[in-house]
Image (cartoon, grey):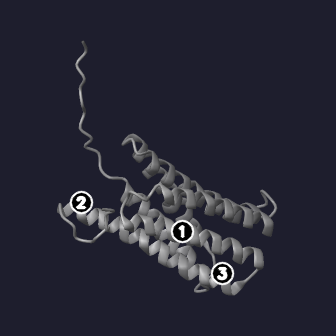
Amino acid sequence: MENEVKVKDSTGNPAPLGLMGFGMTTVLLNLHNAGLFALGSMILAMGIFYGGLAQIIAGSMEWKKGNTFGTVAFTSYGLFWLSLVGIITFPAIGLSEPATTGGMVSYLTMWGIFTGMMFFGTLKANRAIQFVFFSLTILFFLLAIAEGLGSETLGVIAGIEGIICGFSAIYTGIAEILNESNGKEILPLWPVQ
């Protein structure tokens, strides 16, 4: 009979990296959506490097830890950011035609559906991560409706909601870092009982 060897996982928690990459990039894009500044290289660069690549790295690290939810979530949203930057930049450099209104509504709606389904995967997690996914689901559908109606007012409302969503992810990431590094709860995550 072969002896089974258990190996202790001593790798770090990749979730704060993914949450910070998602949260900070989401806040910045939605400051634009709320009408505070134009879309420019700062948002696009954040979308590629922190929203995109950092989340893909975090998703790969979650895979190594055996966390399917974290793998799918971080990798998917990292690729969302890269695809969004492509949708914006490809027409500007002559690689494609701009996305149609119907195309963008479909794109945002699919991400809303995906996020809504992922929200159900958080129901046994803490309330903080539940809020991130719930508010992100609302954000995608608000953006899709604003795009479909061509409503600048609804776009600003979506921007404000997106800022809240992004800051909730930042809070969750910082709480995980502080709680882990201090060995006690510094910022509450409100675990499910």
Q: How crowded is the residue under tag 2: few (<14 C-alpha within 10 Å), some, or many (20+)? A: some
Foreground residue among 2 and 160: 2
Q: Nearer the viewer, mark 1 or mark 2?
A: 1
Q: Which residue is mark 2?
A: 180
Q: How far separated are the C-alphas under marks 1 and 3?
A: 15 Å
Left or right: 123, with 5 as reference point? right
The amino acid beneath tag 2 is: Glu
Q: Characterize the local packing of mark 1: few (<14), some (14-19) or many (20 or more) Cα atoms within 10 angstroms.
A: many
Quadrant in the picture for residue 153: bottom right
Q: Quadrant of the N terminus?
A: top left
At 37% across and 58% down in the image, what residue appears? 125
Quarter-of-image position of residue 106: bottom right
Residue 59 in view (yes/no): no
The single residue placed furthest to the left in the displayed view is 183
Q: Position of residue 77 (x, y in %)?
A: 54, 57
Quadrant of residue 103 within the rendered picture: bottom right
| Residue on which disc 1 sits | 136
